[in-house]
């Protein structure tokens, strides 16, 4: 039960609902028996969370504890993204891979612990964002960000 409710304290009502459903769907990654019997649940999850609530947080995304979703609308997180512990995601944010000129895709971003991501942020490509990073609203991140940074702008630039 700890796994299912590990994000409860850092979220409000909508974030709590999304995160409980996400953790239940995500549980199959770590438990092979559950992986097989959870297929109908994951279909329900996709319908309810993505289509009804408007948050595309794919069930196979790897997320550390205490993931906070603020306003949770128009959020898109690719299933191959890795999110560290104590991360905050806000509305209208996209985190995913990038289409290359040869038709292939890059890997998805790896985001460290204690990362605070503002609204309308776009993080794409094979990049690593370090620990304790704050990303300002409207920032477009397409290159690695060192730990303990404040990042803003399009293109992104470290200001602190």
Image: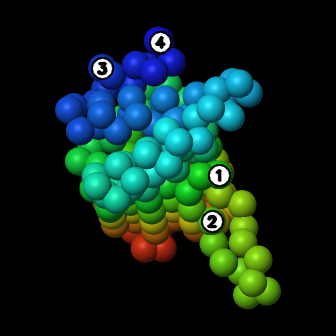
Residue 96 visible: yes
Whole-angstrom CA distance, mark 2 to mark 3, is: 30 Å
Residue 66 shown left or right of residue 64 in the figure: left
| Image coordinates for residue 12, horizontal then vertical, percent | 22, 31
Residue 116 visible: no
| Image coordinates for residue 156, horizontal then vertical, percent | 48, 66
Q: Is residue 142 above or below residue 28?
A: below
Q: Tell me, what colour scheme is on the image? A: rainbow
Label 2 environment density (alpha carbons within 10 Å; few <14, some 14–19, many ≥20): many
Q: Going from the N terminus, do you reach mark 3 or mark 4 first?
A: 4
Tell me what residue is drawn at x 71 percent, y 80 percent: 100
9 or 13: which is nearer to us? 13
Q: Going from the N terminus, do you reach mark 3 or mark 1 first?
A: 3
Residue 9: mark in rendering: 3
Q: Are marks 1 and 2 in contact (CB under 8 Å)?
A: yes
The residue to which callout 1 is attached is 80
| Res 54 → quadrant | bottom left
| Res 32 → quadrant | top right
Whole-angstrom CA distance, mark 1 to mark 2, is: 8 Å
Residue 26: mark in rendering: none
Label 4 environment density (alpha carbons within 10 Å; few <14, some 14–19, many ≥20): few
Label 1 environment density (alpha carbons within 10 Å; few <14, some 14–19, many ≥20): some
Name of the residue lying farthest toward the left: 13
48 or 74: which is nearer to us? 48
Q: Going from the N terminus, do you reach mark 4 or mark 1 first?
A: 4
The residue to which callout 2 is attached is 97
The residue to which callout 4 is attached is 2
């Amino acid at each position: 039960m700890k796994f299912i409710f590990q994000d409860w304290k850092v979220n409000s009502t909508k974030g709590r609902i999304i995160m409980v459903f996400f953790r239940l769907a995500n549980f199959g990654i770590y438990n092979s028996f559950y992986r097989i019997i959870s297929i109908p649940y994951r279909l329900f999850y996709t319908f309810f969370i993505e289509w009804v609530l408007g948050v595309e947080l794919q069930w196979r995304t790897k997320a550390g504890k205490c993931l906070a979703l603020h306003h949770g609308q128009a959020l898109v997180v690719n299933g191959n993204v890795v999110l560290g512990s104590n991360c905050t995601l806000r509305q209208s944010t996209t985190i995913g891979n990038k289409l290359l000129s040869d038709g292939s895709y890059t890997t998805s971003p790896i985001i460290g612990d204690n990362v605070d991501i503002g609204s309308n942020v776009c993080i794409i490509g094979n990049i690593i964002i370090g620990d304790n990073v704050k990303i300002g609203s409207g920032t477009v991140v397409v290159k690695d960000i060192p730990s303990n940074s404040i990042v803003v702008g399009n293109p992104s630039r470290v200001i602190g």
